[in-house]
């Protein structure tokens, strides 16, 4: 059984908490979303390592205590995408690697696809479709309702107080049922001083005044797998309707009868689709 090992990596003049699994094989980086950490990927990483892959799951900027700069300007998606490449280089993923992301990890991953496609052997997005499709979907009243929380995250201090109230009751209510160690890791990170402001700055940098959102019209030639749950509370069908028009290379869109928490609640389906994606796109 391949174990998942915690550690640290220096990248972009910051220190990132990471988890690794597998000693050899094609490299795979996995990006978590909000409000999680790399702990969400541990079961997936163990299975990928058994299948012969070398995995890295960082706690991204704002989540790692040593990578938590002040100010929303430090959390633009282009900078977060730059962290991915710097982490890959520091981890020895010097050539191309496979990239996987869920939720905000998918948002960052799409930015990597846009800016650094030459480094990717394949790309797998969970829950969040192409940014251009997401932007189009936001014009739909149903999706506007689903995304209302983004507006509530904007005023500095307000969301932090709401999430922390009553022993972090609202924050705890966001997570699906998960292993106790996974939830403990999330809480240990997100309750640190300044951590919640840092991770909410992802939303403030993208969707606050002058922010670019996630919308960007770029074609994708990287082999792509998109997994979306048709019971997703946050990402409705409207965001998926124009997704395919941006795909100019190999592309697989898989609709699951699932909610937003695909890894925790649809583990077998996600693992099977991910392994198929990696195997049909070997690094040559």
Image: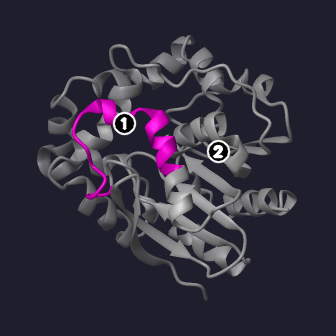
- Residue 261 circle label: none
Residue 42 in view of the camera: yes
Mark 1 Cα-neighbour bin, 10 Å: few <14, some 14–19, many ≥20 = many
Is 133 rendered above or below residue 90?
A: above
> Percent position (x, y) of residue 217?
66, 19
Residue at 26%, 58% in the rendered image: 65
| Quadrant of the image containing the C terminus | bottom right
> Percent position (x, y) of residue 60?
41, 52
Residue at 18%, 36% in the rendered image: 162
| Quadrant of the image containing the N terminus | bottom right
Residue at 59%, 24% in the rendered image: 134
> Percent position (x, y) of residue 108?
52, 40
Which color mode does the image show? one colour
Number of dots carrying numbers: 2
For residue 59, side relative to residue 279 (left or right): left
In the current view of this chain or complex, which residue is farthest to the bottom? 1
Residue 264 in view of the camera: no
Of circles 1 and 2, the one toward us is: 1
| Real-space Cα separation, disc 1 to disc 2, in angstroms | 20 Å
Q: Which comes sooner in the sequence, label 1 or label 2?
A: 1
Residue named by callout 1: 75
Q: Is residue 239 magenta?
A: no
Residue named by callout 2: 125
Q: Secondary structure at mark 2?
A: strand
> Percent position (x, y) of residue 166?
13, 47
Considering depth in this image, is 100 or 258 the residue closer to the camera? Answer: 100
- What segment is highlighted magenta in the picture? 64-84
Q: Is residue 73 magenta?
A: yes
Is 79 rendered above or below residue 241?
A: below
For residue 95, side relative to residue 87 (left or right): right
Is 237 rendered above or below residue 187?
A: above
Which of the 4 image quadrants contains residue 58?
Answer: bottom left
């Amino acid at each position: 059984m391949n174990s998942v090992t915690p550690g640290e990596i220096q990248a972009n003049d910051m220190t990132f908490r990471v988890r690794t699994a597998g000693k050899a094989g094609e490299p795979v980086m996995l990006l978590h979303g909000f409000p999680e950490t790399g702990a969400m990927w541990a079961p997936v990483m163990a299975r990928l390592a058994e299948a012969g892959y070398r995995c890295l799951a960082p706690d991204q900027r704002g989540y790692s205590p040593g990578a938590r700069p002040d100010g929303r300007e430090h959390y633009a998606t282009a900078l977060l995408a730059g962290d991915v490449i710097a982490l890959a280089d520091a981890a020895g993923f010097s050539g191309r690697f496979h990239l996987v992301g869920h939720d905000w990890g998918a948002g960052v991953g799409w930015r990597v696809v846009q800016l650094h496609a030459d480094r990717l052997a394949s790309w797998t997005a969970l829950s969040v479709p192409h940014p251009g499709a997401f932007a189009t979907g936001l014009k739909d009243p149903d999706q506007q309702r689903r995304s209302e929380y983004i507006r509530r995250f904007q005023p500095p201090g307000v969301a932090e107080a709401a999430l922390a109230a009553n022993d972090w009751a609202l924050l705890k209510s966001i997570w699906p049922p998960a292993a106790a160690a996974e939830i403990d890791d999330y809480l240990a990170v997100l309750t640190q001083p300044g951590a919640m402001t840092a991770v909410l700055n992802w939303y403030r940098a993208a969707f606050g005044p002058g922010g670019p959102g996630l919308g960007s019209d770029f074609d994708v030639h990287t082999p792509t797998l998109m997994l979306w749950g048709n019971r997703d509370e946050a990402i409705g069908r409207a965001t998926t309707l124009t997704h395919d028009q941006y795909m100019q290379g190999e592309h697989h869109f898989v609709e699951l009868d699932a909610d937003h928490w695909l890894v925790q609640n649809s583990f077998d389906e996600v693992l099977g689709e991910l392994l198929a994606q990696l195997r049909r796109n070997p690094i040559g």
